[in-house]
Amino acid sequence: MSMLKTIVKIILFPFKFIFGLTIGFFVVLFEILIYPFQSFRHFWRAIFASIVFAIISFSLVFNLSYIYDTYGLNNAICFFTNSDEDSPAKKVVRIIGDYSEGSGFFINENSVITNYHVIEGEPSPKIILPSGELISPTNLTHDPNLDLALLQVESNHPDLVMSLEGPDKYLEKDLPVFAYGYPMGTDIRGEATEAKGHYIATRDARRNSDASLIQTDIDLVEGMSGGPLTDYCGQVVGINTLGVAGLSMFIPAFTASYSIYSFTDTKITKLDLSPEESPIKAVEAFYSYLMLRRMAPAYDLLSSSYRANATYEEWTSRFSDILSVQIIKTELVAGETDKVFVKFLTRNWVSDSIDAHFYEGVWVTKPEDGVYTLSRSMIKEIDDPPSDWDLTGPEF
C-alpha cells in the first residue's frame, strides 16, 4: 500500500504543483492590475504587493533550480515524496558470525548480499531480519576479489528486497548519498543507522584492474560493511566495503549485479561430518547441525526412542535462538564405549543482543541404521564456568 501511495504521489505531484502555481499567479496578477484603479492609495499597495510577489517568485525559482541541480529530477521528486515508511534502514539485515559481524540486504526474495570479509571463514553465518527473526543461509557463494558474498535462504522476503538493477551512470559530484548498516555490530541495538554524505568520484581499484569503487565523504565504521549505499530515492548505487579517515569506498551496484552469476563456493568453510565413525563423531555432528541450523538431520541423529518422546516441532522450538555452538571438549567416558562427555557453549540471539550459555555433561549413544545416534542426555548448564575451560577449541 505504501508503495502505491508513493507512486501516486510521484505522478500527481508535478501536476498539482504547476496547477496551484499557475492559478496563484493569475489571481495575484489580476489583483495587481485591477487594484490600483480603485484609488490612489491602492496604487501604492499594488506596487508593494508586486515587489513581494517578485521576491517570492524569484525565491521559488531559485530553490527549485537548486534542488534540481543538487538532486537531479528523479531525486528531486523523491525529496518531496519520501516517507519514513520507505526508509532503507527498515530493510537492512544483520550478518552475525563467530569471527565478525556486518550488514547486508536482500537483492531478491531469498538472497542476501554482503561483503566477503564479513563471512570469511564462517561455516554458517546467521542473518537477523529487521523484525528480529533469526534465519540461516542454505548456500553461500562469493567472489573474494570483489569482496562480495551471496547468502541464499529458504524463506522468501519480498518486502525487504532492494534491487541492484538501477542506473549506473547518473552519479554526479556532490550528489547526496546514504549508507546504511549496523555500526559496532551487536554492541548497538535497534534498527540500521543512516549515514549521509556526498558522492565524490568513482575510482579504479588497485586490487583488480577490472573493478572500480565509489568514493564518498561518509565515515563508515566497523559493522556497516555489506550494507547498501543509496540515493535519495532509496535506489541502491553501491555496497559498503571500506571506511578510513572520513572517507569510504563502495562497490558499485552495477558491478555486483553482473558479477553474482559467477560467484563460487570454493574456499567456503565446510564441515566434515561422519556420525557413522564413532560416538564422538556423532555428538560432534549433532552440534554441527545445530550450528548450521539444519534441524532435520540433527533430529535424525537422535535415537528412535528419544524421538518417540519429542516431536520434531516441539524439539526444534528449543533451539530457535541459537547463533552458534562451540565445542570445548568431547571424549569417551573412562571405561565406557557408548558414553561421550561433552563440554560446549552456545551464543544465543535474545532480545536484540547476544547471550552466552555454558554446558557440560554426557550423551549416551547407540548404533542405529549404520550411524551412532544420541539416545539419552545428562547435560546441565554451568552458570559460572571455571577458568580452566579452554575457550579456544574448534567451533561447529
Image (cartoon, helix red, strand yellow):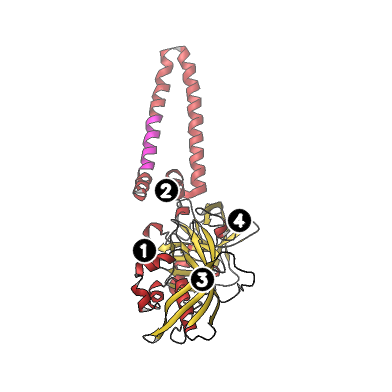
Identify the amino acid type marked 1.
Asn
How far, Cα to Cα, is label 3 from label 2? Answer: 37 Å
Check disc 2 and report the residue beneath it.
Answer: 85
The magenta segment: 12-24
The disc, 4 or 3, on the residue closer to the chain's N-terminal end is 4
Task: Specify whether residue 296 is in view.
Answer: yes
Report the Cα–Cα distance between label 2 and label 4.
Answer: 25 Å
Q: Residue at x 53, y 61 (%)?
A: 354
Q: Which mark is residue 219?
A: 4
Q: Earlier in the sequence, mark 2 or mark 4?
A: 2
Residue 17 among those drawn in magenta:
yes
**Mark 4 vs mark 3: in front:** 3
Q: Secondary structure at mark 2?
A: helix
Residue 154 found in image quarter: bottom left
Nearer the N terminus, badge 3 or badge 2?
2
In-front residue for pair 186/217? 186
